[in-house]
């Protein structure tokens, strides 16, 4: 019994250290690991990032370690392999998936090319396509892989394999003291890594929130101006209880939106702000109908082109430049513009590439759009964009970050993320 207890204690002490060492060694340029798919699969079972010795010039050991830490801290089934340009591509993804035996999202940087595949339970083909498309412009391997992982961690479903947290095997009882010493050192190192990762994550959240704050403040201001223009007085002639209730709900929504935004600490908090603004605008639409003696409006999503236009009045056919035709909810003014063959009034936001439509500015605007278009409306409207792919996931409106997509069609090629055609790195496992 003493021997069994000692082995259990050793496992508990050593497992975190072994996992940390696996992260350090998996992508080490100096490691003399074979490049067979079975060896790569074995390495990925122990750590989310593998760098082939022949591809060590693409991603340094420290960068691989940081990338692995990011994935492990998130606890998501995302795998990254960095391989030399001449590595055989036939059935590469299928074989990697078979060798690891783990459901997940697999990204491979092969020389100067990049591609990814995923089990359908983790991420849809469209979602994978969006991720791959968003990072094609990043020629630098470090930047590309970090962008891919950042976007992937906000989109995938599932959980990290338990093998990342366990060292496996057993140690002789005599190694207990040595293991304890290693644990003390390893624990301090792991704490430092975790602390750095947490600080990095918090810094990313603050930056994303500040980007959103500009847009949300514009929305709150516009809603306040609508309240001022309304010029409604609860005691005015003809005002009834229903009108006063609509007006009170609108005022409450305005105050709630300001309070929610002042209290926001992370991008996800913005969703409650825009939801409050949308609720207030619908109350104003009801109040306007009552005052004018019109039928009460049905509850519809806001205008797709700019939620500040208020609740939509109809669905209109619209074809974005270079994209496919779709039907979107529109306000009366944009409905008239489209009918006349003119462009709608599109909401644009600031990005590092200049002013862009909000749906083309990446998943940073997921929380903002999620409050306006709750209930899974947007994914169908935004097919072909990073925001649309992200919102198709289980937590759309909760993600944040960078990444850009477009409404254009997908032509495939050497790095298609849309399917598992044999011509793209070889077969698939989806």
Image: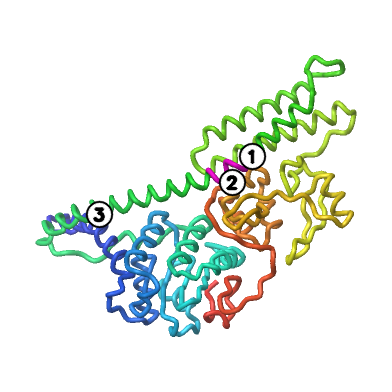
Marked residue nearer the N-terminal end (2 or 3): 3
Look at mark 1 in the image and give the residue it sits on.
274
Mark 3 crowdedness (10 Å alpha carbons): few <14, some 14-19, many ≥20: some
The CA span between labels 1 and 3 is 42 Å
Residue 242 forms part of the magenta stretch: no
Residue 5: x %, y % from top left: 17, 55
Look at mark 2 in the image and give the residue it sits on.
367
- Res. 260 visible in picture: yes
In the foreground, 105 or 265: 265
Residue 243: x %, y % from top left: 79, 23
Marked residue nearer the N-terminal end (2 or 1): 1
- Is 387 placed left or right of 168 in the picture? right
Look at mark 3 in the image and give the residue it sits on.
189
Magenta-drawn stretch, dominant element (helix, strand or loop): helix
Q: At numbered mark 3, what does the secondary structure look like: helix, strand or loop?
A: helix
The CA span between labels 2 and 1 is 9 Å
Q: At numbered mark 1, what does the secondary structure look like: helix, strand or loop?
A: helix
């Amino acid at each position: 019994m003493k021997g069994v207890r000692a082995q259990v204690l050793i496992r508990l002490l050593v497992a975190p250290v072994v996992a940390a060492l696996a992260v350090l060694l998996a992508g080490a340029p100096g490691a003399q690991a074979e490049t067979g798919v079975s060896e790569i699969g074995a390495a990925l079972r122990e750590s989310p990032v593998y760098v082939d010795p022949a591809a060590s010039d693409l991603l340094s050991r420290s960068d691989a370690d940081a990338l692995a830490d990011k994935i492990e801290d998130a606890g998501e089934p995302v795998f990254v392999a960095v391989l030399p340009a001449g590595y055989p591509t036939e059935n590469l993804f299928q074989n990697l998936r078979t060798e690891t035996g783990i459901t997940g999202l697999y990204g491979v940087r092969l020389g100067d090319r990049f591609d990814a595949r995923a089990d359908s339970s983790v991420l849809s083909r469209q979602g994978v396509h969006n991720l791959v498309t968003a990072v094609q412009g990043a020629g630098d391997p470090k930047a590309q892989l970090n962008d891919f992982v950042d976007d992937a961690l906000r989109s995938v479903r599932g959980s990290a394999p338990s093998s990342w947290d366990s060292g496996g095997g057993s140690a002789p009882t005599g190694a207990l003291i040595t293991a304890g010493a290693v644990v003390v050192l390893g624990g301090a190192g792991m704490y430092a890594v975790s602390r750095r990762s947490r600080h990095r994550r918090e810094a990313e959240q603050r930056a994303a929130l500040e980007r959103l704050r500009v847009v949300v403040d514009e929305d709150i201001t516009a809603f306040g101006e609508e309240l001022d223009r309304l010029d409604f007085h609860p005691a005015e002639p003809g005002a009834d209880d229903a009108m006063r209730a609509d007006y009170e709900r609108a005022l409450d929504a305005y105050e709630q939106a300001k309070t929610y935004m002042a209290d926001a600490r992370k991008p996800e908090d913005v969703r409650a702000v825009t939801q409050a603004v949308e609720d207030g605008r619908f109350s104003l639409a009801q109040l306007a109908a009552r005052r004018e003696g019109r039928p009460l409006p049905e509850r519809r999503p806001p205008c797709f082109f700019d939620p500040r236009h208020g609740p939509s009045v109809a669905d209109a056919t619209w074809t974005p430049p270079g994209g496919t035709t779709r039907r979107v909810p529109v306000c009366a003014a944009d409905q008239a513009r489209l009918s006349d063959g003119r462009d709608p009034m599109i909401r644009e936001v600031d990005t590092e590439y200049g002013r862009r439509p909000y749906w083309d500015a990446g998943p940073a605007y997921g929380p903002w759009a999620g409050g306006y278009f709750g209930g899974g409306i947007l994914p169908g409207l935004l097919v072909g964009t990073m925001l649309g792919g992200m919102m198709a996931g289980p937590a759309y409106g909760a993600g944040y970050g960078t990444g850009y997509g477009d409404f254009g069609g997908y032509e495939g090629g050497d790095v298609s993320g849309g399917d598992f055609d044999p011509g793209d790195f070889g077969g698939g496992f989806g």
